[in-house]
Amino acid sequence: MIKIALDMMGSDFGAVEFIKGIKMYLAENKEVQFICCGNKEELKELEGLERVEILPTTEIVPMKTDVLKFLRMKDSSMYRALELVKEGTCQGLVTAGSTGGFLAGSTLMLKNVKGVNRAGFCAPFPTAIKGKQTCILDIGASNTNTGEELVTFAKLGSIYAKEILHIASPSVYLLSNGAEEGKGLEETKEAYEILSNQSDVNFLGNVEARDCLDGHHDVIVSTGYPGNIFLKATEGCAMMMNGMIKKAFKRNLLSKIAYLFAKKGFVEMKETMDYRKTGGAILLGINGVAIKTHGNSDAKFFYYSMDLAYRMIKADIVSKIGEAFKDEKR
């Protein structure tokens, strides 16, 4: 039985959507058990459910927090969920809470896998090819990184793509302002040189931001600052385009009729670009599976977040990362 800790109190909607997602997932997966950390009153609906345990907590980590504040909140739902993974009661956790608290807590409490110099905050993205994802890291765990840390991200992303996305030899690229060799930040150039001389990563050069989501780039590596900007810009463009399309088809009667003819295509596009199916962001390279999902997640998003945690644990990805980095000297 796989045990997953759930921080029930970090969502924008409280525990309501999370509870719906739990019920959906339990109905389909008989190999999983959840320990739900949160306010006992808000979790009453889970009482008596098979394979669900409630761990009452009294605090919620605020969105804006620092390391010391997080470490003092020992009875917060996020701290207790991380503690369950740290002590080995659970193999992974899912939270929709504070990103700062998540990154600080996961790094300090679970610590990096031996040989990993920097854990990578990885976001799977939907692409133009239906059912195909690309993973981008780092997306903001830190603002700056060294060339060697980018090489670590390349290895971590490649392992994730092999084990979870089932890509036999994932293509790995460095996010840059040009596809040619020699472009990019100094640390990008340094990583380019190192990766070009390694055989354990299928490194194929640089990629520009406009090509990242075409479905032909499996792992994209970046320092945290531009990686986070790419993430936010992509989310913003997607919301803007969605709003513009809706507005265009609601303009008049003829546009509404035109939508009926084009509806099938737009439904397919919506399914292809459904970010909820990615399951959320992952901190790769720590001793445990840690999933950070969106604060505004609905039941379906939570469902996929729990499934991602389950699949990563089932794939024993932490041990595989440890095996890949066992000869690294840090």
Image (tube, helix red, strand yellow):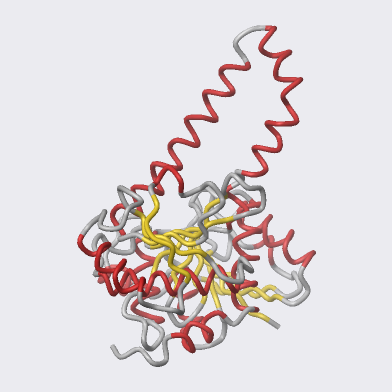
Using residue 53 as the reference point, say whether residue 184 is left or right of it.
Answer: left
In the image, 286 versus 259, the foreground residue is 259
In the rendered image of this protein, does residue 165 appear above or below residue 30?
above
**Count the marks: how many?**
0
Q: List x then y, in percent, for residue 207.
A: 40, 52
Q: In front: 100, or 193?
A: 193
Front-most of residues 232 and 207: 207
Which quadrant is home to the N terminus?
bottom right
Check the image and report above or below for 324 versus 150.
Answer: below
Direction from residue 194 to residue 249 in the image, left or right: right
Instruction: Report x, y in % for residue 191.
Output: 30, 68
Q: Is residue 151 left or right of residue 26?
A: left
- Residue at the spot x=42%, y=86% of the render? 325
Q: Position of residue 110 (x, y in %)?
A: 41, 81
- Relative height, residue 256 to residue 150 (above, below): above
Q: Is residue 291 left or right of residue 26?
A: left
Question: Farthest left residue?
Answer: 186
Residue shown at 65% from the left, 38% from the top: 270
Q: Quadrant of the C terminus?
A: bottom left
Residue at point 36%, 65% (across, down): 101
Q: Observer-nearest residue: 277 or 104?
A: 277
Q: Position of residue 133 (x, y in %)?
A: 58, 56
Residue in view at x 76 percent, y 73 percent: 50
Q: Residue furthest top?
A: 253
